[in-house]
């Protein structure tokens, strides 16, 4: 009977050991599942953050492109205004040159008239 009792105790110890191993395996599986869930959540969160960052970056780039187009448009308008002003300046310079020429011609005529008057006064 002692042998039967000893065998029963050994069997019970083996069952206890097996139950402990099963509990440990279940706990390990739960730990692994929680780790996998945490990793999946963190991955999804990282993907959401990356997507938001990409959208923000695209928004900033779009705004920069719009601002660049606006600045290019203003630059083109400024260039056109500068060309128009340069045309007006060239026309004004041409008028000034014609006026200077007319003044020179008028001065020459005045000098001729003065000489003629002086000659006429001498003759008279």
Image: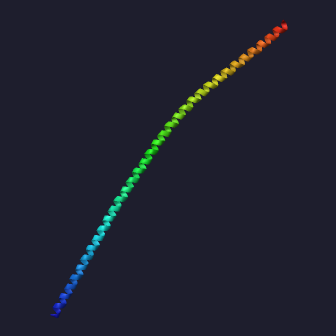
- Asked which quadrant contains residue 41, the reply is bottom left
Q: Is residue 48 left or right of residue 80?
A: left
Q: How is the image coloured?
A: rainbow
**Residue drawn at 64 percent across, 25 percent down:** 93
Task: Classify 48 as above or below 124.
Answer: below
**For residue 63, above or below residue 101:** below
Q: Residue at x 51, y 34 (%)?
A: 77
Q: Residue at x 75, y 15 (%)?
A: 110
Position in image of residue 40 (x %, y %): 32, 62
Q: Residue at the top extreme?
A: 124
List the single residue furthest toward the bottom: 2
Q: Quadrant of residue 29?
A: bottom left
Residue at point 54%, 34% (across, down): 79
| x then y, percent, for residue 36 | 31, 66
Residue 93 falls left or right of residue 13: right
Picture coordinates of residue 23 (x, y %)? Answer: 25, 76
**Quadrant of the image containing the C terminus:** top right
Q: How many marks?
A: 0
Q: Which quadrant of the rendered structure holds the N terminus?
A: bottom left
**104 displayed left or right of 82:** right
Q: Against 20, is 38 above or below?
A: above
User: Image quadrant of residue 121?
Assistant: top right
Is residue 98 shown left or right of residue 111? left
Q: Is residue 99 above or below residue 39?
A: above
Q: Position of residue 30 (x, y in %)?
A: 28, 70
């Amino acid at each position: 009977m002692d042998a039967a009792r000893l065998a029963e105790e050994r069997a019970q110890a083996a069952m206890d050991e097996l139950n402990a191993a099963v509990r440990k395996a279940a706990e390990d599986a739960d730990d692994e599942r929680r780790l996998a869930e945490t990793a999946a959540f963190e991955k999804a969160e990282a993907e959401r953050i990356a997507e938001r960052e990409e959208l923000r970056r695209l928004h900033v780039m779009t705004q920069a492109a719009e601002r660049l187009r606006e600045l290019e448009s203003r630059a083109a308008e400024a260039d056109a205004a500068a060309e128009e002003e340069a045309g007006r300046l060239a026309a004004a310079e041409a008028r000034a040159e014609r006026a200077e020429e007319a003044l020179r011609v008028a001065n020459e005529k005045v000098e001729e008239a003065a000489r003629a008057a002086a000659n006429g006064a001498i003759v008279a």
